[in-house]
Image (tube, rainbow, N blue to C red):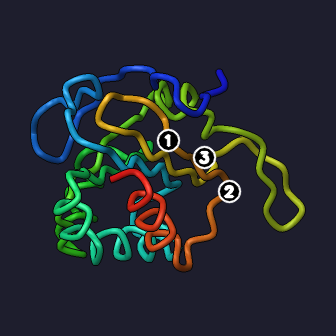
Amino acid sequence: MKLKINKKTPNFKLPSTSGKTFELSKVKKNLVLYIYPKDDTPGCTLESKDFNKLNNIFMKNNTLVVGISKDTIESHIKFKNKYKLKFNLLSDEKLSVIKKYGAWGKKSFLGKKYMGIIRSTFLINSDGKLQKFWSNVRVKDHAKEVYKELKKMV
């Protein structure tokens, strides 16, 4: 499925570190949805910490930050507590949302080809419409780049 700019993003429900089920259609704010490969790995930790640093600024701009990976809720809770993340992480162990959002595909590492999570970020407005997305994200300064795009929206 290919997501399109200015079109509604597919609704989903996933377990959250808040202890409740997160449902996209119930979010009435702008949303930064970042999909990352694995809790507590160098790139994912840096990306999460960068979004965490900017979380208050995102919140002031009526924007929720949420991370998704295929890790379990238990893993997410440990990761969230370890780095004092102020936002929730969602668990997509069945890869349903990750695949629906086009963040699952062929990757290669050290010459080996395999299927895996493609680091991606989606900026969704308060009406549930996709404003911008990034695929194969480079972690450095990515959170700032997302914030710059958000500023164009608000």
Q: Which residue is mark 3?
A: 117
| Element type at mark 3 | strand
Q: Residue at x 60, y 52 (%)?
A: 134
Identify which amino acid the numbered label 2 is placed on.
Answer: Asn
* Mark 1 closeness class: few <14, some 14–19, many ≥20 residues within 10 Å: many
| First in sequence: mark 1 vs mark 3 | 3
Task: Please indicate whether residue 135 sits to the left or right of residue 8 in the image.
Answer: right
Give the x, y percent position of residue 110.
84, 68
Q: Is residue 143 above or below residue 66?
A: below
Between label 2 and label 1, give the one nearer the viewer.
1
In the picture, the quarter occupied by the N terminus is: top right
**In which image quadrant can residue 29 be found?**
top left
The residue type indicated by label 1 comes to: Gln
Q: How many marks?
A: 3
Who's the residue at 79% across and 63% down the image? 109
- Please tell me which of labels 2 and 3 falls first in the chain: 3
Q: Which mark is residue 131?
A: 1
Looking at the image, residue 7 sits to the left or right of residue 76; the answer is right
Can you give x and y, in whole percent of width and height, for residue 87 in the image? 21, 58
